[in-house]
Structures are given as C-alpha cells and as structure tokens.
Image: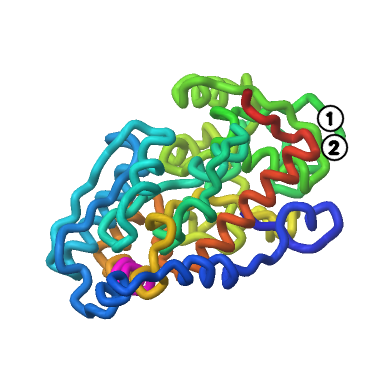
Amino acid sequence: MVSRVPAAQRMMRSPVRAACILLAVAAGMSGAHTQAASDSGYPNKPIRMVTGGIGGGIDFVTRILGLGLTSVSAQQVIVDNRPSGAVPREIVFRAAPDGYTLLVAGGSLWIGAVLQKAAFDTLRDLTPVSLVTAQPSILVVHPSVAAKSVKELIALAKARPGELNYASAATGAASHLAAELFKAMAGVNIVRVTYKSGAARQTDLLSGQVQLSFATASSLESYVKVGKLRALAVTSIRPSPLFPDLPTVAASGLPGYDSVTINAVFAPPRTPMAIVGLVNRVIVRALGQPDIKEKYLVGGLETVGSSPAVLTDAVRAEVAMLGKLLKNKSVAYEE
C-alpha cells in the first residue's frame, strides 16, 4: 500500500531501502552454501513450497507458481498445505536455507504479526525472494448513493459524516485496510460494518443496508455489469489490466492512494544471497511465461515478479502504513 507526499497522506508511506537487511542475510553464508549456490543447475531436486490452507486464494497462487517452476526447471514442485496461521512460517523458519523449502504467503503474514503484537518479524525471521502477484480491489457503491466518482463520494462523506457505512471483512483484511486508508487520506468519517461471511457482506451491500465496499472484482463484477452496484475506481496506484475501464482512486480525487493485496515468496532465515539470487531468477522466469500470466489474470490477479529488494520495500511500506493507522486509532490491535 502506498501513499505519496501531500501532508495528510505523507503518513501513509515513506521510501525504504532493503540493502542493509540483504547484506546482513548474506553475511551468514557458509562454504557448503556457497558451493550449492555456484551450481548453475538449480534446482536439481524437488522444491517444497509451504503455504496455508487448501482451496483458498493463497493455495491458488502457490499451485500456479508451482506449474510455472516445473515448466522452466523440469523439477517437481511439492505444494505443502498447512493450516493457516503460524504453522507455515514456522516450518520455513526452521528449514535448511538451501533454496529448496520456500514459503508462499500474503499480507496476513506481516499484517497479522503487527495486529497481534507477535514476536515474529517477517523481514528479520524470513528472507524475501520475490513478489508473485498483486490484486487490487474496486471501490463500489450502491446505486442509491449520489456519487458517481471518488471526488463526489468524498464530498458526500464530508457533508454527511458518520452516515455512510462500508462493508468489511475481518480486521486486517483487504476490504478493511483499503477503506481505513481511504478514510484517513480523505479525512472522512465512514462507519465500518464487519461481517463474518462474504455472502452476508454482499447481501447487505446489494440491498443498500451498507452503502459502499472495497472488494475484489470477481465477487462483484456481475452485479456491476447489470447496474446493481456502481464501480467508481480501482485501488492500485496505476491502472489495472483487470479493470481497463476503471480509473484509479489516486487519479480520481485522492492522489497517492494505493491499496493492493500482494503475495510473495520467502526463504528461511540466513539463506545466502547467492542462493536467493538463483531462486529469484527461476521464479521470475516462471512468472514471465504467458500461460502463467493468463492463469493468474483469469483468477483476478496481476503477475508481479520482482527483486528481493522490491519485496522488502513492499512489506516495510505496508507495515509502516499499518503502524500509522494504529497510531491514529483507525485500526486497533487484536487482543
């Protein structure tokens, strides 16, 4: 999640650098790891990718990535599904730092750690490898809302403080943080209504019980097409190929606004940078395949292969943004 310089927005994100962490990780290199990293045949045995849950979004991301890795390396990729929560990260935390056990995780890894005041620190206790996908949301309103643009919605919310409601999933979910970031940057009072299920959230949004929501296109696209909901903008900082006809929130009245869900690959702590580089190159090559990009696009995801430094910056920026929201009591710690 990103925000740029204007005063009220500056709190949301500041530039960060990854070099010091990456150099510190590199310092742990051993002779055996150096020899492994010098082997240009990586991978030369199956890769184990640990992730949380079965059948959910992160499982989909992991399995498509596995197909890509198998295609470019001819090595088997074993997807190791574990219960969501701390289990996947603990497995990878304790694994050998040889590039053959990897964690595929989303923002709940670092956002959850902050909200729960956990001792775990993503960038200290794991080694960033690459971003995999990004998923923007769309800002939608019920047709009864007299706003046909982001600017009009902000003006309406300022004229009617506390009268508009937004539908939200659990604390820390994309629908929650996107809305709270919007409120903080726009300086508006829109009331959160929390739902335990997506079905209930959707029902109340369609009936007008709640007036707006930040949601994935796949969950609401059909209702937007038939006019039951009105899409105002996409939440990414740049236009998205997922929503080619929608402007961004940033370009529609809230400069610097950026809220996307990212998924990424991490290696165990103390993985030598030479090995990280080999893993990164294979992953980026896998993600560059047209069929892999298409599979992700059909699933509502943009493909984003990156350097470890870019992933580090993304995690730091989200943690910093969340810290500001916590400080301003837009979000509360979970007890």
Residue that numbered label 2 is attached to:
158
Question: Is the stretch drawn in magenta largely helix, strand or loop?
Answer: helix
Residue depicted at x 28% and y 51%:
49
Question: Which of these two is toward me, 313 or 113?
Answer: 113
Q: Are marks 1 and 2 in contact (CB under 8 Å)?
A: yes
Question: Which of these two is toward me, 282 or 228?
Answer: 282
The magenta segment is: 277-283
- Is residue 247 in view from this perspective? no
Q: Residue furthest front?
A: 31
180 relative to 216 in the view: left or right: right
Identified by mark 1, the residue type is: Pro
Say which mark, if any, is on residue 161: 1
Horizontal and vertical percent for residue 217?
46, 43
Q: Residues within 10 Å of mark 1 (few under 14, many from 20)?
A: few
Horizontal and vertical percent for residue 218?
41, 41
Compared with residue 314, is residue 150 higher up or lower down, i.e. above or below?
above
User: Quick one: SS at disc 2?
Assistant: helix
Say which mark, if any, is on residue 307: none
64 relative to 252 in the view: left or right: left
Residue depicted at x 26% and y 76%:
35
